[in-house]
Image (cartoon, helix red, strand yellow):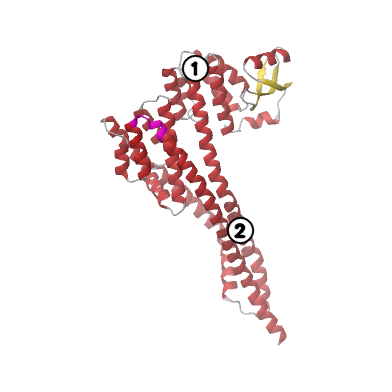
Amino acid sequence: MPTFTYKARDTSGKAVRGTMEAATKEGLIDKLHKMGYMTTNIAETRAGVRIESWFENFRPVGTDDMILFYIQLSNMIGAGIPILAALEALSKQVANKRLREAVGSAARSIEGGDSLSQALTGHPRIFPKLFINMVKAGEASGKLDMVSLRFAHYFERRVDLQQKIKGALFYPAILLVAGVAVTLFIVTFIIPQFVDIFLKSGIRLPLPTLILYQVGVGIKRFWFLAFLFFIATYIGIRFYVKTKNGKLKLDRLKLKVPIFGYLHRTSALSGFARTLATLTESGVPILQSLDVTKNVIGNEVLGLALESARVAVEKGEKISEPLKVSGEFPPDVIQMISVGEETGSLDKMLNKIADFYDMSLGYAIKKLTTVLEPLFLVVMGSMVGFIMASMLLPMFDMITVLKR
């Protein structure tokens, strides 16, 4: 049976693409129509090894691939398609090879008698623990389609938040890297040539020129030692951070660093509220929800506070009390969680907390960008000015000598 590549659009208008076997093009169009897709392009794949197919083996599973998978799974289950049939269809049309293989493996596990949550557990690098726990709750409540769609929205929001942070830091990072690269080039290659000319002319080197010259000579002679030092330091820090004590100290430092500590804390609080809200909305028990949230929040200090909250809830107490005692959660978060517990609307309050901190993070990122850009320009200007001074001062002395 021939294999076709296709492009189509789902009911929401999103573009999808993939491969699927069918007897004819018309048969494939009919299959896609039954799955709720409008076909825009179909082409039969030819036999042979393609370069893009070889590169596909190394392509990581992207966030776009996962969001589309969650939405498609929700749509198909909501349309009444059995889970096994839905996964088999998705395994043939998912564009990413690694995700396609994982979905196919999950389909085979379900065929062998496993539930969807059990089948997904075998692929922890692709399907996060948060999604697996939500699927388990969805299986128990019979609302698997709603759970999958809810997680897609959650995942999309978290990715969008991460992209905002990366986007805000991208331009300053480019300025820093470019500035350091140009400075190293000037110090190691340009300055030594000028210094040779000055020394042959009998010009006494001023202090700025002498400093840059010695730095350039040191870099050219001992660059490999500096490289080995940085590599050893990086490996040592990575090894230490993997220990429990090291991770705790690093996360505590992240929360205390000026400016960036506020960003990290705000992002972590938003993630905590959004994750816990999504889990409780999906019907996951509160103790299990706190366990999952602690593991995905991304900060060991806040994770310890959540562990205390879990112990307290297990004893019949409220979540808000141990969070207040920890001192790591702002008073407004504690107050809103307390109100949510008393009124039975904890998930709604958590969503409001997440929305507020998402908005606060957006404002903080804009403010950071407006501060960092001129700051980096000042730093770069100072570096250029120092380099220019180190080159011009000896030139003035040379001109004075020539006039004599």
**Extreme-left residue of the structure:** 315
Residue type (three-letter) at the residue carrying disc 1: Ser
- Residue 372 locus on image (x, y percent): 54, 56
Q: Kindly identify which residue carries mark 2.
A: 179
Residue 257 horizontal side relative to residue 106, left or right: left
Residue at horizontal 65 percent and vertical 80 percent from the top: 397
The image position of residue 126, as x and y in percent, is 51, 29
Residue type indicated by callout 2: Gly
* Residue 249 appears anywhere in the view: yes
Please state the extent of the stretch shown in magenta in the rendering.
Answer: 343-349
Decide: marks 2, 1 in contact (CB < 8 A)?
A: no
* Label 1 environment density (alpha carbons within 10 Å; few <14, some 14–19, many ≥20): some
| Residue 36, position as x, y percentages in the image | 62, 18
Q: How far is the residue under mark 2 from the one under mark 1?
A: 53 Å
Q: Secondary structure at mark 2?
A: helix
Q: Which residue is mark 1?
A: 109
The image quadrant where one finds the N terminus is top right
Frontmost residue, 295 versus 105: 295
Q: Assign the magenta stretch its main secondary structure.
A: helix
Nearest the viewer among 341 and 263 is 341
